[in-house]
Image: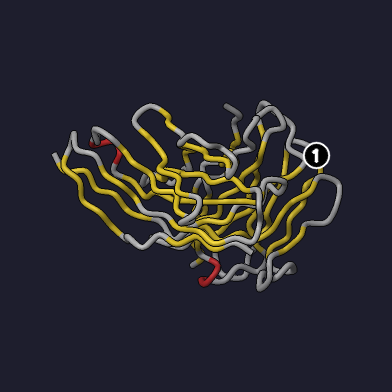
Amino acid sequence: AQKITQTQPGMFVQEKEAVTLDCTYDTSDQSYGLFWYKQPSSGEMIFLIYQGSYDEQNATEGRYSLNFQKARKSANLVISASQLGDSAMYFCAMRPLFDYKLSFGAGTTVTVRA
Amino acid sequence: GAVVSQHPSWVICKSGTSVKIECRSLDFQATTMFWYRQFPKQSLMLMATSNEGSKATYEQGVEKDKFLINHASLTLSTLTVTSAHPEDSSFYICSATSSGSPIGELFFGEGSRLTVL
């Protein structure tokens, strides 16, 4: 069984600044994948970034980077140069490597201020 | 990326009626699809795993007679909320993974917002 914890219900960030969203997880699986998704108010789920448990380097995807600390079981998302369009709910998720069933954290609502 | 389409986006129905939600993979074949339910400002809760050609696997606490799932083809899964009641009002979202994706991320439909009066 997996458990994903996002302790920040909501965050405010100034436009053009960076923001870090926390995610910790617990799993008994040795191989797993970590994902971040963005959910705007419209409801669709947008895939942002992926980190495999055996990946040695932190994943980056444009303005998104994942600060992966395996020993601490954390996978924080960093959004650099925030834009107004980044205002949304962000979910951390994980699954065992050989199972597509994804478990989600509680989510963090990010509001970008002009 | 792979595209998953859900229909309808919004549905309002009277209590006691049944509602069917369709989930289609438009440009790939999905042997497995997942149905999630989401209450406002909350996380996505997995309801069931839909497997093409076989019975769905429901998560603990999900009534399979209330939420009927059919996955009759490699591109279509349907969720039918039977005898809907106001407490079934929620956002339902489906997802699928494409074998063409190297990391196996889930691609989500647009979601269906159900309101039961």
Residue at the spot of label 1: B73
Q: Is residue A17 above or below residue B113?
A: above
- Please rate how many residues cluster around mark 1, counting C-alpha atoms within 10 Å: few if below 14, some from 14 to 19, many from 20: some
Q: Is residue B53 visible?
A: yes
Residue located at (31% from left, 38% from top): A79
Residue B42 position within the rendered picture, expressed as x and y whole percent measured from the top left: 43, 62
Q: Is residue A106 above or below residue B24?
A: below
Corner quadrant of residue A63: top left
Q: Is residue B12 visible?
A: no
Q: Amino acid at mark 1?
A: Ser
Q: Is residue B109 above or below residue B91?
A: above
Residue A44 position within the rendered picture, expressed as x and y whole percent measured from the top left: 47, 42
Q: Chain of mark 1?
A: B
> Which residue is at the front of the view, B2 or A53?
A53
Please count the marks in the image: 1
Corner quadrant of residue B52: top right
> Which residue is at the front of the view, B31 or B8?
B31
Q: Residue furthest right?
A: B53
Residue A39 position within the rendered picture, expressed as x and y whole percent measured from the top left: 41, 45
Residue located at (56% from left, 37% from top): A55
Indicate left or right for A104 with B51 as reference: left
Residue located at (65% from left, 45% from top): B22
Residue A23 position within the rendered picture, expressed as x and y whole percent measured from the top left: 42, 55
> Which residue is at the front of the view, A44 or A103?
A103
> Which quarter shows the N terminus of chain B?
top right
The figure's colour scheme reads secondary structure
Q: Residue furthest left?
A: A114
- Element under label 1? strand
